[in-house]
Image (cartoon, rainbow, N blue to C red):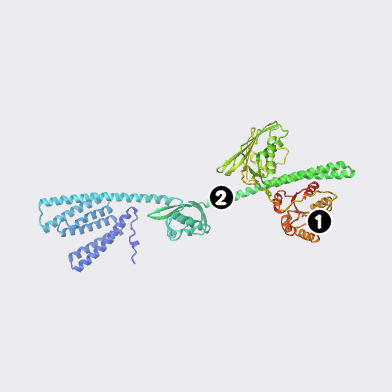
């Protein structure tokens, strides 16, 4: 089978001659076929002259083709054109007339010579061809028709000369234009190839059938495939399975004319099986009325590895910082609680001493001191719980103006610091935990007051503040939305730049008094409210704290319907004895609670887990000796806590009077106890007075 692709492959290495080679080879092959056909016809008709001419022409064309394969382009071109000219001359001579139709092949041969020969050889060949044709025409005329009249001969010669001259000029202009267009296209193609082939970016185009239309050398080298291997595969074969669906969806949508993502990062698979990250920049082009996907591919594996390394190092640094902060926090907590325990143990030791002396007055004083120390410990615990973001907030729709005014006036009562509060008209409402926000305002006003020992002024401004797009204020990003901004500005000593980034760290303080939890608690509370806090300060010029609270349009969220009516009863020691069931996992707590309730004329029943409580509730119903109060600890390690236990109790006794107790004051249930079926709460640690107040309201 004839391999026409190989047959038409240019034998020369010079790319500038490629078009000439293809054209000449095509013309020679066609001429050989025509000469064979002419020989066959001449042989069939018995025309000897025709047979001789055909054989001669076939030989000359074959010789020209051989020279072309020997890379003799110029000689091959001249021989081909000369052979064609010879055919024209023979036809002209035997035509017997200067107006023979063979003469009109002259423009064709001139076009061929313009395409195959350079300028000088072109002019020489065309001029010689015309002269030879004229001479042959004259000889033919003279041989077959005799000498023509001088006037006719001259006019005919002039007409033919003008015709051929105009033809030569027109053809030369056409050839020059074609050469310019070809050279321009060739130059553009060379520029494109030089650019794309030398870029360290993989450039490719693909069609809607999933095959590559074009790839540059870097693309092949990058993936490790040869160009032939690339063109035989679908482009999706090189994409990692994690990203195949993404790439297919985007490429199909792009070729369909839809607006899709232009830049994206994917993983590709090399020929050796390794996986690399690349960034793809893709678009669509129209080439010869065909929609093609155009893409550029750049290796970002090193960047990805570096990002992963940085992320791992950052995680290690963050872990180290957290451990450092945890160490500082643990040390601070241990310091504070050791001081408190010292106060408790010291006072208990003194009580024991005074017991021996039977000094009742001093014993009462020391018991009062112990109560104060325990209250301080309870406050510290609650502050730590708030800082740790435990539990849920008890949110209310509130006016920040009232909270700010009340707490500012309370803190600055008797201070030598003046203050001024201004606000926008129609100040927006916010949804906040009023107790915690009061703590925020108090802490900030206390800090401002302490920064001005010789007196000064605090300016507080409340205003509506809208953010149309995320903004950054003093390094803090404020998300888009509507806020109420509270700005507290003092004229104090200011905060040094080297410590301003540490002021929200737990147990960081520059004061001789205080535990360093004030601003840490402020930051935690604001963050729990999904707000923002910014600080600006300059040494000697004061400090400004700006608080951002989201505007709310909701109604109060804590006005929940009561699930169990609260029965108020007054406690009197002469009342009939009542029954209480106490569940707690701590024996010490059970012992203290039992003693307190017995002193309040209660029949006390104790339990350490939810299963036992349920059995006792069932028995109390069967015997008719129901419990007046069921006190449930919310946290029972390894067993049912108070919330789950009450859920089962309500199925047995819907009218149970259940009280929740926990040392975790910001527990979800403690914040919204009615919603879970409880009638009240008792926060740990508690005193006789706390229990007495609880009993009076049960």
* Disc sitting over residue 40 in the figure: none
User: Which tag is nearer the camera, tag 1 or tag 2?
Assistant: 1
Query: What residue is shown with label 1?
Result: 605
Q: Distance between the residues labelled 1 and 2?
A: 62 Å
- Residue 473 is at least partly visible in this image: no
Total labels drawn: 2
Q: Are marks 1 and 2 in contact (CB under 8 Å)?
A: no
Residue 507 appears at what percent x and percent y?
70, 43
Residues 29 and 550: in front is 550
Badge 2 density bin: few <14, some 14–19, many ≥20, Cα 10 Å:
few
Label 1 neighbour load within 10 Å: few <14, some 14-19, many 20+: some
Please name whichever residue, 423 or 509, is drawn nearer the observer in this view of the structure: 423
Q: What element carries label 2?
A: helix
Q: Which residue is drawn at 68% across and 34% down?
A: 451
Image quadrant assignment for residue 5: bottom left
Residue 175: x %, y % from top left: 28, 51
In the structure shown, which secondary structural element does the residue marked by tag 1 occupy? strand
From the top left corner, tell me how far across and down residue 354 is, in percent. Answer: 87, 43
Q: Residue at x 77, y 57 (%)?
A: 608
| Residue assigned mark 2 | 307
Q: In which quarter of the image is residue 208?
A: bottom left
């Amino acid at each position: 089978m004839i391999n026409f692709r190989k047959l038409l492959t240019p034998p020369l290495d010079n790319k500038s001659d490629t078009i000439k080679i293809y054209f000449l080879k095509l013309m020679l092959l066609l001429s050989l076929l025509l000469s064979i056909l002419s020989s066959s016809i001449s042989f069939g008709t018995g025309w000897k002259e025709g047979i001789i001419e055909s054989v001669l022409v076939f030989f000359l064309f074959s010789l020209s083709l051989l020279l072309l394969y020997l890379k003799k382009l110029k000689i091959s071109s001249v021989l081909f054109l000369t052979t064609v000219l010879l055919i024209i001359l023979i036809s002209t001579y035997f035509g017997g007339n200067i107006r023979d139709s063979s003469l009109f092949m002259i423009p064709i041969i001139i076009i061929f010579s313009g395409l195959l020969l350079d300028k000088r050889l072109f002019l020489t060949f065309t001029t010689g061809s015309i002269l030879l044709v004229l001479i042959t025409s004259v000889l033919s005329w003279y041989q077959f028709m005799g000498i023509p009249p001088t006037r006719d001969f001259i006019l005919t010669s002039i007409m033919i000369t003008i015709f051929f001259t105009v033809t030569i000029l027109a053809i030369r202009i056409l050839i020059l234009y074609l050469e310019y267009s070809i050279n321009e296209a060739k130059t553009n193609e060379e520029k494109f190839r030089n650019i794309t082939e030398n870029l360290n970016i993989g450039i490719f185009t693909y069609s809607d059938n999933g095959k590559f239309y074009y790839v540059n050398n870097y693309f092949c080298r990058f993936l490790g495939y040869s160009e032939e291997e690339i063109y035989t595969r679908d482009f999706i074969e090189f994409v990692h399975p994690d990203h195949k669906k993404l790439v297919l969806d985007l490429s199909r949508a792009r070729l369909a004319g839809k607006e899709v993502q232009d830049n994206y990062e994917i993983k590709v698979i090399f020929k050796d099986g390794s996986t690399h990250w690349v960034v793809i920049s893709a678009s669509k082009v129209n080439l010869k009325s065909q929609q093609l996907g155009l893409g550029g591919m750049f290796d970002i594996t090193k960047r990805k590895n570096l990002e992963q390394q940085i992320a791992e190092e950052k995680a290690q640094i963050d872990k180290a910082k957290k451990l450092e902060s945890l160490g500082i926090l643990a040390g601070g907590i241990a310091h504070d609680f050791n001081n408190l325990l010292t106060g408790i143990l010291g006072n208990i030791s003194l009580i024991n001493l005074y017991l021996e002396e039977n000094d009742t007055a001093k014993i009462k004083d020391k018991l009062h001191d112990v109560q104060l120390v325990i209250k301080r410990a309870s406050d510290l615990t609650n502050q730590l719980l708030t800082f740790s973001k435990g539990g849920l907030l008890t949110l209310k729709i509130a006016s920040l103006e009232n909270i700010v005014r009340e707490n500012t006036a309370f803190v600055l009562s008797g201070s030598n610091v003046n203050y001024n509060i201004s606000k926008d008209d129609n100040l927006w409402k916010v949804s906040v935990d009023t107790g915690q926000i009061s703590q925020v305002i108090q802490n900030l006003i206390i800090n401002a007051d302490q920064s001005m020992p010789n007196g000064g002024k605090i300016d507080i401004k409340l205003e509506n503040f809208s953010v149309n797009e995320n903004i950054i204020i003093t390094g803090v990003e404020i998300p888009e939305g509507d806020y109420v901004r509270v700005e507290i500005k003092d004229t104090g000593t200011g905060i040094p730049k080297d410590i301003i980034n540490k002021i929200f760290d737990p147990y960081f303080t520059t004061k001789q008094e205080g535990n360093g939890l004030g601003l840490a608690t402020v930051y935690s509370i604001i963050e729990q409210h999904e707000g923002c806090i910014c600080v600006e300060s300059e040494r000697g010029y004061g400090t400004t704290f700006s608080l951002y609270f989201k505007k709310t349009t909701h109604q109060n969220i804590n006005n929940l319907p009561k699930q169990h009516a609260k029965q108020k009863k007054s406690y009197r020691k002469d009342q009939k004895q009542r029954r209480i069931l106490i569940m707690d996992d701590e024996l010490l707590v059970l012992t203290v609670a039992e003693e307190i309730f017995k002193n309040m004329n209660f029949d006390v029943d104790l339990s350490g887990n939810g299963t036992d409580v349920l059995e006792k509730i069932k028995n109390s119903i069967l015997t008719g000796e129901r419990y007046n109060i069921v006190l449930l600890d919310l946290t029972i390690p390894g067993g049912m806590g108070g919330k789950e236990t009450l859920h089962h109790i309500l199925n047995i006794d819907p009218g149970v009077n259940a009280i929740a107790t926990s040392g975790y004051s910001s527990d979800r249930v403690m914040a919204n106890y009615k919603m879970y079926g409880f009638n009240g709460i008792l926060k740990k640690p508690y005193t006789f007075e706390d229990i007495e107040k609880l009993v009076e309201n049960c």
